[in-house]
Image: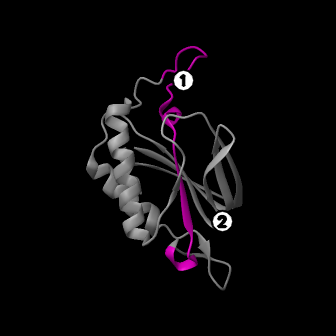
Amino acid sequence: MRAVIQRVSQASVKVNGIATGEIETGFLVLLGIEEADTEEDVSWLTQKIIGIRVFRDENGLMNKALADVNGDILLISQFTLFAQTKKGNRPSFIRAAKPEKAIPLYEMMIKILENLLGKSISTGIFGADMKVSLVNDGPVTVIMDTKDKDNH
């Protein structure tokens, strides 16, 4: 499971011109799920997302977590995070999980994030052609991969 976490001052997603999710201060999380991912990966990654301290404190240092700033989450599924680009110019997405594997893990992630944050999160629509807009605050962008747990 791979996540690109962007600290934003605002972010939104539209499907067919209709907004399905919109936030102000918080995280835009692009989530890639691969065939090898499990519920344990969801649990680990949600804890890391909620706990990461990248918001500024009163001294301007990145010491605050999402809950400390009453931040929100916009979660977007993105299978292209598992693009393999070693051969040729056309990426392969063979590592990305098929919908029957990915959707339950994506839905589990939504529920756990909502429970940990104590409020609803915003989302895109799994598998849809989405238009994502954001204002990256900082910019601050962090990439997490559950296969690299020892490095985080």
Amino acid type at circle 2 is: Glu
- Colour scheme employed for the rendering of this structure: one colour
Q: Residue 18's mark?
A: none
Q: Quadrant of the C terminus?
A: bottom left
Residue 126, given in percent of the width and then of the height, sits at: 48, 39
Q: Nearer the viewer, mark 1 or mark 2?
A: 2
Q: Local crowd at mark 2 within 10 Å, few (<14), some, or many (≥20)?
A: some
Q: Quadrant of residue 104?
A: top left
Range drawn in magenta: 67-92
User: Who comes first in sequence, dot 1 or dot 2?
Assistant: 2
Q: Residue 24's mark?
A: 2
Residue at the (38%, 32%) spot, across then down: 99
Provide the residue designation for mark 1.
85
Describe residue 13's horizontal placement relative to residue 43 as left or right: right
Residue 118, given in percent of the width and then of the height, sits at: 42, 72
- The local secondary structure at tag 1 comes to loop
> Closest to the observer: 81 or 10?
10
Residue at the (60%, 72%) spot, across then down: 55
Q: Is residue 115 above or below residue 81?
A: below
Residue at the (37%, 58%) spot, across then down: 111
Q: Is residue 108 above or below residue 26?
A: above
* Count of all numbered marks drawn on residues in the image: 2
> Closest to the observer: 24 or 51?
24
**Residue pushed farthest bottom?**
58
Residue at the (41%, 23%) spot, across then down: 94
Q: Is residue 71 above or below residue 48?
A: below
- The local secondary structure at tag 2 comes to loop
Q: Quadrant of the N terminus?
A: top left
Amino acid type at circle 1 is: Thr
Residue 131, given in percent of the width and then of the height, sits at: 66, 40
Q: Quadrant of residue 9?
A: bottom right
Q: Local crowd at mark 1 within 10 Å, few (<14), some, or many (≥20)?
A: few
